[in-house]
Amino acid sequence: MDLFEAAGPDPKTPRPLADRLRPKTLAEVAGQDHLTGPEGALTRLLRTRSLGSLIFWGPPGTGKTTVARLLAGETDLAFEQISAIFTGVADLKRVFEQARSRRIQGRATLLFVDEIHRFNRSQQDAFLPVVEDGTVTLVGATTENPSFELNAALLSRARVLTFKALDEEALEKLLKRAEVEEARPLPLDDDARAALVRMADGDGRAVLTLAEEVWRAAGEGEVFDTAGLSEVVQRRAPIYDKAQEGHYNLISALHKTVRGSDPDAALYYLARMLDAGENPLFIARRVVRMAVEDIGLADPQALVVANAAKDAYDFLGSPEGELALANAVIYVATAPKSNAAYTAWKAASKLAKERGSVMPPKTILNAPTKLMKTEGYGDGYRYDHDEPDAFSGQDYWPEAIGRQNLYEPVERGFEREIRKRMEWWDKLRRERG
């Protein structure tokens, strides 16, 4: 499902406002100028008349389906739409066969796959042959990060284009177009109009659906204030605008209270964000970040718990899944803290940028050719598992850099054990020269 989804086939059925306002050209698509503007990525692709396969990544109601339809029209491709939620292997085979038949008759197919991330890995693999041989131009839509949810093989054959949540200006433009379509103003005062925009949460379809609800509810000459709007649509406006200061203030407060090991304050800020309408998966991602940045290897289980909470919310939804987030926040707030891995990674990244062209020692490089063997590749390498204590003590650093100490585990949590191991290995390294 996406912005401006098509209405049912019966022409007598009243068409929803979102459907009536469906853009007829790419230039009419709201809020995606980086893709559909005069110099947008898609506009440039259309100039070449060759799209290639694409993945549209972005939140609901941002125009992914609409843009796919427009691209098919602009390139004279047959438009075929399926949803991963309702499509099985047999359905895919049927769609591919239809596309092959069209191709024989001289017309190519743009296959739009909504929620493509919901296909499993083997189902995603099924697209590879028809994409490679040109049977279909694949356009997949997903609300999830393609890097994590799609096969690498499929990603390597497609270009990922990011759709942005609509900002207030884009949503306001949609409301003005709706007022023109309806030939009447939206019966809201200024504060209520701003609240309606916030309720839509960057979703173009949502803002038009809300506007329709308001028009249906308004009596002759009636104008709603913010309280009246909430009564009509039975939806609370977010306490803060997620694109503005409050959004960043509260997530910052949550992160710092976790870092400061205060689970009570952390739960308070978590509750405030959820009550304000924050995207729970945004919070879950930040809790994962807290686990790797502020706890790290002091408690390796923190990352497991944070990821499990994200998966649990994704599975349960709201409100049941909110308790999983609360559990994770309590866990990371009460876990031992260490930023040693975070600090070591920053130092390693900096060193790699500064000295990234230095050759590793030849002793640890493989010698797959005779020439490389004659050049000394692999000479002197000692297989650690054959050494006492499974430790050879070799120097693995490039000679031009010399041995560096980047990771300094703290004396807290599991890192205390890691520190003991590293000190023991240092002792063996010195003894064995």
Image: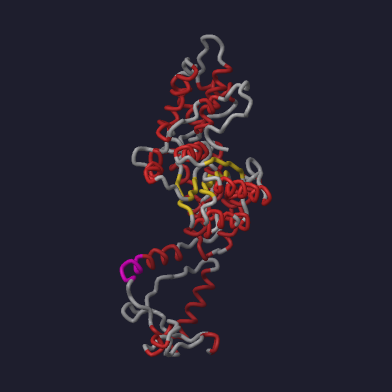
**91 on left or right of 70:** right
Q: Does residue 278 appear anywhere in the picture? A: no
Near-viewer residue (311 or 175): 175
Is 278 part of what is drawn in magenta? Answer: no
Figure coloring = secondary structure
Near-viewer residue (32 or 100): 100
- The total of numbered circles placed on residues is 0
Q: Quadrant of residue 150?
A: bottom right
The residue sitting at the front extreme is 105
Note whether 253 is above or below 393 in the view shown.
above
The quarter of the rendered structure image containing the N terminus is: top right
Note whether 31 is above or below 116 in the view shown.
above
Q: What residue do we see at 48% from left, 63% from top? A: 338
Q: What residue do we see at 46% from left, 18% from top? A: 189
Near-viewer residue (425 or 42): 42
The residue sitting at the top extreme is 220
From the image, give the main secondary structure of the stretch colored magenta.
helix
Q: Please state the horizontal and vertical placement of residue 224, each as a whole percent of the image.
A: 51, 17
Q: What residue do we see at 34% from left, 79% from top? A: 402
Q: Please state the horizontal and vertical placement of residue 43, each as a whole percent of the image.
A: 38, 41
What are the residue bounds of the magenta stretch? 350-356
Q: What residue do we see at 38% from left, 90% from top? A: 374
Q: Please state the horizontal and vertical placement of residue 179, each as a whole percent of the image.
A: 46, 19
Q: Quadrant of residue 426?
A: bottom left
Note whether 233 is above or below 94 in the view shown.
above
Q: Does residue 197 appear anywhere in the picture? A: yes
**108 on left or right of 312:** left
Q: Please state the horizontal and vertical placement of residue 124, each as a whole percent of the image.
A: 59, 55
The quarter of the rendered structure image containing the C terminus is: bottom left
**432 on left or right of 143:** left
